[in-house]
Amino acid sequence: MNNTDPEVERIQLELLRQASPAQRFALMASWSKMLMQSSYGQILERVADEREAEI
């Protein structure tokens, strides 16, 4: 599912193409860190819910 306006998406892709390899790597690393933190948070919520159900 994509809710990004086509013009905004075009601009984002153009900016990404213009970025240096170092800038693209930094962006990828940032996205990766954000996704890992989000996943970790969801795992902690599930564990807490399961432990609460056991009590």
Image (cartoon, rainbow, N blue to C red):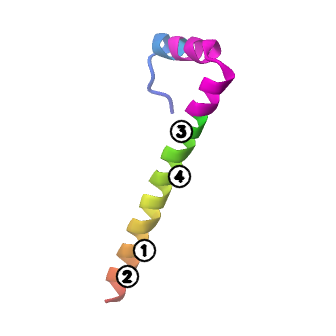
Asked if the residue under mark 1 is in contact with the one under mark 2, i.e. CB atoms within 8 Å, the reply is: yes
The kind of residue on which mark 3 rests is Trp
Residue found at x 40% / y 78%: 50
- Along the polypeptide, which appears first: circle 4 or circle 3? 3
Q: Earlier in the sequence, mark 2 or mark 4?
A: 4
Percent x, y of residue 5: 44, 17
Magenta segment boundaries in residue numbering:
11-27
Above or below, 40 relative to 30: below
Q: Badges 2 and 4: C-beta atoms under 8 Å apart?
A: no
**Residue at 51 percent of width and 11 percent of height:** 11
Element marked by disc 3: helix
The residue that disc 2 covers is: 51
Q: Earlier in the sequence, mark 1 or mark 3?
A: 3
Return the mark for residue 36. 4
Residue at image mark 1: 47
Can residue 53 be found in the magenta stretch?
Answer: no
In this view, 14 is above or below 55:
above
The image position of residue 12, as x and y in percent, is 52, 17
| Residue matched to label 3 | 31
Cα distance between the residues tagged 4 and 3: 9 Å
Q: Quadrant of residue 20?
A: top right
Pointers 3 and 2 in contact (CB under 8 A)?
no
Categorize mark 3 by other alpha carbons within 10 Å: few (<14), some (14-19), many (20+): few
Q: Amino acid at mark 1?
A: Val
Residue 13 place in picture, x, y as percent: 58, 16
Find the residue positioned furthest to the front: 22
